[in-house]
């Protein structure tokens, strides 16, 4: 079996107390998987919960990351968080380009590309999200949109930098909607992505209403290396159920 990357994106959920409780409950549930070489678990917490997540992740042997960052190291950028601030906490991974950042907060491709480069320069792993809206899929623009999103982020990087990125295909129409791409749809895009990136060793995740009931079918696809999980990652049992379903 291949290695599975199981990453939980908590979005604007989980305050400090809830984060602490999550890891208390997570510890016994994770015990049977803790030494499994085919599983990497990561939790991406909101900024105010990162110190609690750092402690919980360290005690459980999982990675933890942030949900966003700004590309400048300091300055007059009210409300932003810098890479050095996250390094102080011990963050090793950062989600960039999530559809909610692109479509709600209007982050353009060139800004996301700057973030990717800044994060790589800091020896932190970017989790680069990309994906199409329902209108773009229905109008046949899926691959045109994703070519733009991916090429803008990686075109000016060295091959070794491109390989360090973890890529997360997230169809916008399947995020928080209860809908999920079929395993065939997800595989088609992830295979296409691997060919566009031109590196067979890159890690590509699928995200979009992943849960225990659809995990085995999705994660069994050849070019899907794991899942970026939203709502199902807020509770240890539903989060780990995804890997359990795949293994069984």
Image: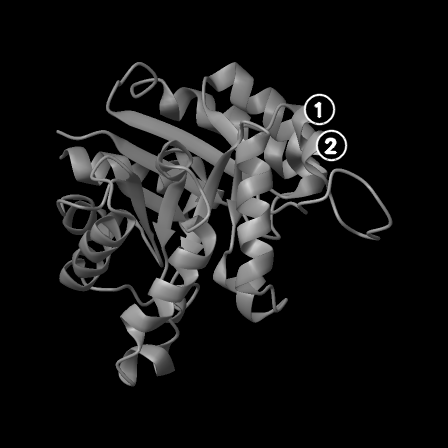
Residue 183: name its quadrant: bottom left
Q: Is residue 114 visible?
A: yes
Q: Where is residue 88? Give x, y as percent.
A: 71, 24
Mark 1–mark 2 distance (CA, rounded to whole Å): 5 Å
Which label was assigned to residue 88? 1
Q: Which residue appears at 28% of the width and 64% of the height? A: 180
Question: In the rendered view, does 42 fall on the left or right side of 103?
Answer: left
Secondary structure, mark 2, is helix
Q: As displayed, is residue 67 above or below residue 61? A: below
* Other residues around mark 1 within 10 Å, as few (<14) / some (14–19) / many (≥20): few
Q: Where is residue 215? Give x, y as percent.
A: 23, 47
For the N terminus, give its image quadrant.
top left
Question: In the rendered view, does 55 fall on the left or right side of 216?
Answer: right
Residue 242: name its quadrant: top left
Residue 56: name its quadrant: top right
In the image, farthest residue toward the bottom: 139
Q: As displayed, is residue 107 above or below residue 199? A: below
Cβ atoms under marks 1 and 2 closer than 8 Å = yes
Q: Is residue 174 visible?
A: no
Between 29 and 1, the one lying in front of the other is 1
In the image, farthest residue toward the right: 76
* Other residues around mark 2 within 10 Å, as few (<14) / some (14–19) / many (≥20): few
Q: How many marks?
A: 2
Between 210 and 111, the one lying in front of the other is 111
Q: Which residue appears at 42% of the width and 62% of the height? A: 149
Q: Where is residue 125? Give x, y as percent.
A: 48, 33
Secondary structure, mark 1, is helix
For the C terminus, give its image quadrant.
top left
Q: Which residue appears at 66% of the width and 27% of the height? A: 87
Between 57 and 161, the one lying in front of the other is 161
Q: Label 2, on which residue?
A: 85
């Amino acid at each position: 079996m291949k290695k599975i990357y199981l990453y939980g994106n908590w979005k604007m959920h989980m305050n400090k107390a809830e984060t602490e409780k999550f890891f208390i409950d997570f510890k016994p549930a994770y015990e049977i998987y803790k030494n499994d070489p085919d599983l990497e678990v990561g939790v991406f917490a909101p900024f105010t919960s990162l110190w609690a997540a750092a402690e919980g992740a360290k005690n459980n042997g999982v990675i933890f990351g942030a949900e966003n960052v700004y590309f400048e190291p300091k300055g007059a950028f009210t409300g932003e968080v810098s890479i050095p601030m996250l390094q102080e906490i011990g963050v090793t991974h950062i989600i960039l380009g999530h559809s909610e950042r692109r479509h709600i907060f209007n982050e353009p491709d060139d800004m996301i590309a700057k973030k990717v480069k800044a994060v790589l320069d800091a020896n932190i792993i970017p989790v680069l999200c990309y994906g199409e809206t329902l209108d773009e899929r229905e109008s046949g623009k899926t691959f045109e949109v994703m070519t733009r999103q991916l090429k803008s982020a990686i075109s000016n990087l060295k091959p070794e930098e491109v390989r360090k990125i973890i890529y997360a295909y997230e169809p916008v129409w399947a995020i928080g909607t209860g809908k999920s791409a079929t395993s065939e749809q997800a595989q088609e895009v992830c295979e296409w992505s691997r060919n566009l990136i031109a590196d067979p060793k890159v890690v590509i995740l699928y995200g979009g209403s992943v849960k225990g009931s659809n995990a085995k079918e999705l994660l069994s696809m050849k070019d899907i290396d794991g899942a970026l999980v939203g709502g199902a990652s807020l509770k240890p049992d539903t989060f780990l159920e995804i890997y359990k379903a795949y293994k069984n």
